[in-house]
Image (tube, helix red, strand yellow):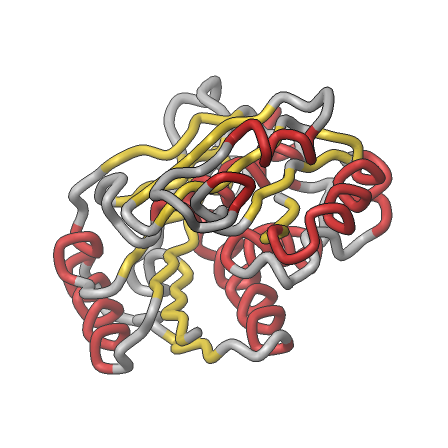
């Protein structure tokens, strides 16, 4: 995947300053995220800017992304409000954006670290309006919230980078450091698109859910779908159970999120 990546704002047009400086933090985070993506075979396009105005740095980043024909654009940010607002959120243009599934996984990944989950929000900001590929803005936490920064400071750049990169590519391990793995041994199963027909024999258009759910005995499941087909997502499970289901499902397995 070709990924346009930007540490929100620029040295000459800085972002929010609270307990920590948003832009200075995101510049360091950018390097960690870039390194993880490249380690796992992705191409990262540097969409940073040193422009002196907000419009200037936004337009330069958008132009770099479009010129490289990126598959996805990610802008790294921290929120800031009144010292009491807190939590993690991701912004996309709409639920029709190709970035929307990534945004859902990303906000859930960060919530697993302890941040309050503010969800995915729909906005029509400059990057949404001017970048051709799917794009998202990650607001990892509030830079002026003591609660958030206390959580943020528990993790290394590598820890935080893996959590983000796993949301984009499930083949990238979510956990870099064993201390995260030890404290968050839960996940949920996502299947591939399920076969149509009776017992999956292709005899009619539609999924035989009774047949499929036999593989999920005693587990709460949610059927999801789009124009391409139907898939199943399970409830949160202990990681051992997730790995057991992965083996049971075989070719139906898609990811542990």
In the figure, is residue 137 to the left or right of 160? left
234, above or below 103, in the image: above
* Quarter location, residue 71: bottom left
Indicate the quadrant containing the C terminus: top left, top right, bottom left or bottom right: top right
Q: In front here: 71 or 75?
A: 71
- State the residue in front, 161 or 224: 224
Residue at x 77% of width, y 51% of height: 247
Residue at image location 28% in from the left, 47% down from the top: 227
**Picture coordinates of residue 238, whole percent (x, y):** 79, 32
Image point 79% across, 39% down: which residue? 239
Residue 90 appearing in the image: yes
Any part of residue 151 in sight: no
Residue 62, located in which quarter of the rendered image? Answer: bottom left
Q: Where's residue 155, x and y in %?
A: 72, 46
| Residue placed furthest toward the front | 203
Expressed as whole percent of the image width and height from the top left, the position of residue 120 reads 37, 34
Q: Position of residue 121 (x, y in %)?
A: 31, 33
Residue 113 horizontal side relative to residue 92, left or right? right
Q: Residue at x 41, y 47 (%)?
A: 203
Q: Is residue 190 above or below residue 6?
A: above
The count of marks equals 0
- Which image quadrant: the N terminus? bottom left
């Amino acid at each position: 995947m070709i990924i346009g990546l930007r540490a929100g704002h620029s040295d000459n047009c800085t972002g929010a300053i609270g307990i920590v400086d948003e832009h200075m933090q995101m510049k360091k985070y950018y390097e960690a995220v870039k390194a993880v993506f490249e380690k796992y075979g992705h191409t990262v396009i540097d969409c940073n800017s040193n422009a002196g105005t907000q419009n200037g740095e936004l337009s330069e980043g958008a132009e770099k992304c479009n010129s490289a024909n990126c598959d996805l654009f990610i802008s790294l940010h921290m929120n800031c409000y009144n010292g009491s607002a807190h939590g993690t959120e991701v912004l996309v243009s709409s639920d029709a954006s190709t970035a929307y599934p990534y945004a859902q996984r990303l906000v859930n990944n960060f919530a697993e670290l302890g941040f309050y989950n503010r969800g995915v929000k729909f906005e029509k900001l400059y990057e949404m309006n001017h970048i051709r590929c799917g794009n998202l803005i990650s607001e990892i936490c509030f830079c002026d919230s003591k609660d958030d920064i206390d959580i943020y400071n528990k993790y290394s750049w590598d820890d935080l980078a893996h959590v983000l990169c796993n949301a984009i590519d499930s083949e990238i391990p979510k956990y870099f450091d064993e201390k995260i793995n030890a404290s968050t041994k839960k996940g949920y199963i996502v299947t591939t698109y399920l076969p149509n027909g009776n017992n999956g024999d292709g005899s009619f258009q539609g999924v035989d859910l009774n047949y499929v759910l036999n593989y999920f005995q005693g587990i709460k499941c949610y059927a999801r779908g789009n124009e391409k087909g139907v898939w199943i997502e399970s409830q949160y499970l202990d990681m051992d159970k997730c790995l057991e289901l992965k083996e049971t499902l075989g070719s139906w397995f898609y990811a542990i999120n």
